[in-house]
Image (cartoon, rainbow, N blue to C red):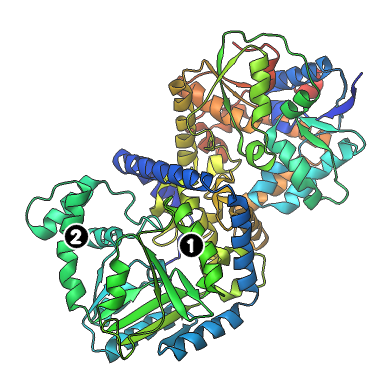
Amino acid sequence: MSELDQPRSRFREAARAKLADAHTLGALDTATARLYGARAAAWGDLPEIEKLRERAQAIRSGTMRELDRHLDDFTQALEARGGHVHRCASAEEAREAIARVCRDAGARLAVKSKSMASEEIGLNEALEAAGVKTVETDLGEYILQLAGEHPVHIIAPAIEKTSQDVADLFERVEGRPVEARPEALTRSARRQLREAFLRADVGITGVNFGVAETGSICLVTNEGNARLTSSLPRVHIALMGMERVVPTLADLAVLLKLLARSGTGQKLTVYTTLISGPRREQEVDGPEELHVVLLDNGRSKLLGGRYQEMLNCIRCGACLNVCPVYRKSGGGAYGPVYSGPMGAVLVPLLVGLEKAPALPHASSLCGACTAACPVKIPLHELLLELRRDLAEQGVATRRERLAFALWSFAWSRVWSYRLSTWLARLGRPLAGRLGPGRAWASGRALPQLSSRRYRDAR
Amino acid sequence: MAGRIQLFATCLGDLFFPEAVADAERLLRTAGYEVDFPRKQVCCGQPAFNAGHLRAARRVARTFARAFTTELPVVVPSGSCATMVAHYLPELLEDARYEAYELSSFLESAGVELARVNEGRAIAYHDSCHMLRELGIAEPPRRLLERTGARVVPLPRPDLCCGFGGTFSVRQPEVSLAMADDKLAGVRLAKAQVLVTADPGCLMHLRGRAERTDGPPVVHLATALAGGLP
């Protein structure tokens, strides 16, 4: 079972639990509304936003068409600068490659900056098992590590926590009261993390973009923790989804212009770090070794297919922030890693529909995600396409397929349509007690079947 | 006569909201159109199409192709069914190239004259997602309501879906209801007397929820324009 799998009934159960938790729901509402507003304002400040989105889409789609070549270029350039590249086909291979590097370095402690790919492969658990303690240094991820929870948002992992929740967690670590103000909380986290930064043997980061022409990796953060993670420890391991490559620095500039604006509404994040290889001879700091782990884990099978555009995702989180379903059900409902519309599309593609059959239906197909996507991925159309696959491949339940087949036969002729609605009128007393009618009537009045259809009244 | 059009009642309109379809027909006649009502019409197949069941959708969509001619425009008192007919039917059936219009945008461009039947009323208008994002129709319904004398008050976050979403409403009823509650709470915040929508799906969902929660009246746009508000 992979980190991404999720059984059919999980979404609804998790969403139901979230809806009963007014405290968390309130935090989520406030935070997503703020991020939504910030993106809208940042996009509004760019008169050329539509052109920029089209350019970004063209860059991403162009890259995917020749992904192998760009990855080869990236690898050569990075190796020429003294870095090591490990291509990993599966989560397991990636976990092993990272554990091996840690073992060779004699590592006992690893600091990590935020990486959703590391969540995808279940890295922390694997490293613990290999005898390497990991400490998350992104504030949100650190909070979740203390709470023993998984991220519920791809860029704001602890979005469902209020400052009071965080203060309570930090108090347990510090053994003394911590004020629930952002400044006090950050100071407290800094105190707790500084020691880990100084002692760590290995630093593990994600990668926002890998630049093929220079072999550079680009990290985008607001806390500066990725800089410490990638420069203080002796060894830096960067885990990169294979689709995160961009051909040139000029392409990178276009995507960076959109990434922060779409995620948090910032023009750029506080730190944008470009790393080109490990420490060179005359340099005074930086790691002795740099390893980039290129993760496939189901991505390459999307190349050339109907879902290739999903690889264009730059993980900005805009689709989560606009999604009315996400803000009611919470990130956890989508599973422990990717959430919101991008998660609902990506997860079934990576693990297979039968392992995440509820996700394509975890959307009202309102299309807000598509409208907010900086690289113009037609997310709601992809969800619809996945629904077709669910039906075609027989992953949709037998009951559902039968119901639609019967309905479609009944409504394929006017006489049988009339008959079916006449029967429905007879069966009305039962309508609220069975199947979909019951789910409908759980909180809504059933519509009155008019005594005369419009066609007859007319 | 301004011309002839075909009226598509939609399945929800035919079965649950015949008064709204009657109002739509009246408005079209007021605008000077001769209205054909093809007797063989049933449904455009959207419920199955959006659930991914293409074969079922195609089977039902054929009723549409048998009932309607591509020679005359089709006017639809439903944002999502208009989207289905205009955007998705050609994907589903060969030669299904219909000139389909959502009611309010059609009425506006036809320059319909409306009586000031809503003088002094504060009305909130709910954008249905397909109509807003696929058809890009946001202003015509609001402008038409204003021309009936109504004050159209803005809802908080008008971009948010009401939670209907076809089968979504019964697959995820809890989330769906929570979304409806937000929408209805917005109507109260906006101090509107009534919520108007141009989509029978949203109407069925929001009215059903409002009835259970002592919410505001929810009415189809055609009824509001034709002077049928409570």
Which of the chains bears the disc numbered 1? Answer: A
Label 2 secondary element: helix
Label 1 secondary element: helix
- The percent position of residue B169, horizontal first and vertical second, equals 55, 39
Is tag 2's residue or tag 1's residue first in the polypeptide sequence?
A: 2
Relative placement, left or right, of B74 versus A28 is: right
Which residue is pictured at 80% across the width and 42% down the height? A412
- The percent position of residue A5, horizontal first and vertical second, equals 45, 65
- The percent position of residue A86, horizontal first and vertical second, equals 44, 86
Viewer-nearest of discs 2 and 1:
1
Figure disc tally: 2
Q: Residues within 10 Å of mark 1 (few under 14, many from 20)?
A: many
Q: Are marks 2 and 1 in contact (CB under 8 Å)?
A: no
Residue behind mark 2: A189
Q: Looking at numbered disc 2 in the image, what kind of residue is underneath it?
A: Ala
User: Does B64 sit above or below residue B110?
Assistant: below
Q: Is residue A443 visible?
A: no
Looking at the image, which is closer to me, A367 or A78?
A78
- The percent position of residue B121, horizontal first and vertical second, equals 56, 11
Looking at the image, which is closer to me, B51 or B73?
B73
Q: Looking at numbered disc 1 in the image, what kind of residue is underneath it?
A: Leu
Which of the chains bears the disc numbered 2? Answer: A
Q: Is residue A162 visible?
A: yes
User: Does B190 sit above or below residue B61?
Assistant: above
User: Does A101 sit above or below residue A53?
Assistant: below
Q: Mark 2 and mark 1, same subunit? A: yes
Residue behind mark 1: A256
Q: Residues within 10 Å of mark 2 (few under 14, many from 20)?
A: some
